[in-house]
Amino acid sequence: MSDNWIAGNLQSALNTWNSKLTEIWSLLTQTPQTFKGGNIWATIVTINGGLKAVGYGLLVLFFAMSIFQSAATFKDFQRPEFVLRHFIRFVAAKVAVGYAMDIMTVIFSICGGVVQSIMGNVGLMASAGVTLPKEIVNATENVGFLTSIPLGLVSLLGSLFITIMSFILIMTVYGRFFKIYMYTALAPIPLASFAGEGTSFAGKAFLKSYVGVCMEGAVIVLACMIFSAFASGSTPAIDTSLSPVTMCWDYIGETIFNMLVLVGLVKGSDRIVKEMFGV
């Protein structure tokens, strides 16, 4: 890193960005069971187990509602096919509530396999980072005191934007984990809706939404891969004929624009998944 404080300030912000990209890559390889040492998962397992009693209560309620809504007359209760159909639905819903934790874990494992497959093919691209070009370093080291004032302001603004985007990026990935935890903790309640024909849509919507949250990891991986490939293959053009202030401003502006594209893709990963899978 340069001894010049302006270049050092910019490189420090870029190092923060690179470290958050590396952290994201590390987070996407983790499972909810191992995230943060597994302490959060232990709490989620406890909540999920406690809500099973509520799920069984709703199961009976939805089942009773379904029977009386679908029966035109009391003679329907004497038809074997009517009783068998509702009995199978009740048993299936009871199994879903009782094994809600296992169902959620299996879904995450399947979606996690997709993420791991993508990362296995392009994992080396994650090592690409953003570094300050030598031309910018030289320009900041060869300026006078008066020129260093606006140049310092430009570098401070650029560093601030880059740092903010870095934390927005990592917070989005952390937010995905928290959504997975909330879905898993509350799973027995929406899964109980499968006991009724008129309420089963809630359970289907819940599972589709959970699959969407899990698949957000694949979209985030692809977005980071595209950005890393772009960052390693090309850098913003540096016009050394310009003044140091203009040169730095152009470089910072183009770099921030490229970073905004990645932040936008990661922030919009939930919307992208919904559009792709119709969830």
Image (tube, rainbow, N blue to C red):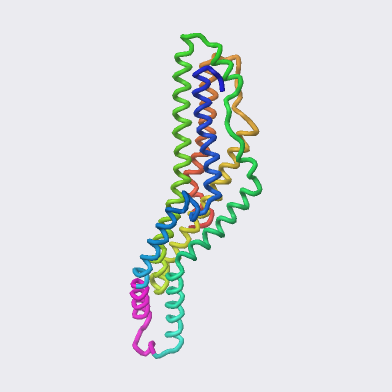
- How many marks can you see? 0
Looking at the rendering, the stretch of residues picked out in magenta corresponds to 57-77
Q: Considering only vertical position in the picture, is 100 above or below 180? A: below
Q: Considering only vertical position in the picture, is 142 above or below 224? A: above
Q: Residue at x 49, y 29 (%)?
A: 13
Q: Quadrant of the N terminus?
A: top right
Across and down, in percent, residue 176 comes to 46, 50
Q: Considering only vertical position in the picture, is 7 above or below 82? A: above
Front-most of residues 37 and 72: 37
Front-most of residues 60 and 33: 33
Across and down, in percent, residue 226 comes to 60, 41
**188 with respect to 7 (left or right):** left
**46 with respect to 236 (left or right):** left
**196 with respect to 102 (left or right):** left
Q: Residue at x 63, y 44 (%)?
A: 123
Q: Residue at x 42, y 61 (%)?
A: 45
Front-most of residues 23 and 222: 23
Q: Considering only vertical position in the picture, is 17 above or below 66? A: above
Q: What secondary structure is the magenta-colored segment mainly?
A: helix
Across and down, in percent, residue 228 comes to 60, 38
Asked which quadrant contains residue 206, the reply is: bottom left
Q: Residue at x 43, y 51 (%)?
A: 178
Across and down, in percent, residue 8 comes to 52, 22
Indicate yes or no whether the magenta region holds residue 217.
no
Indicate yes or no whether the magenta region holds residue 76.
yes
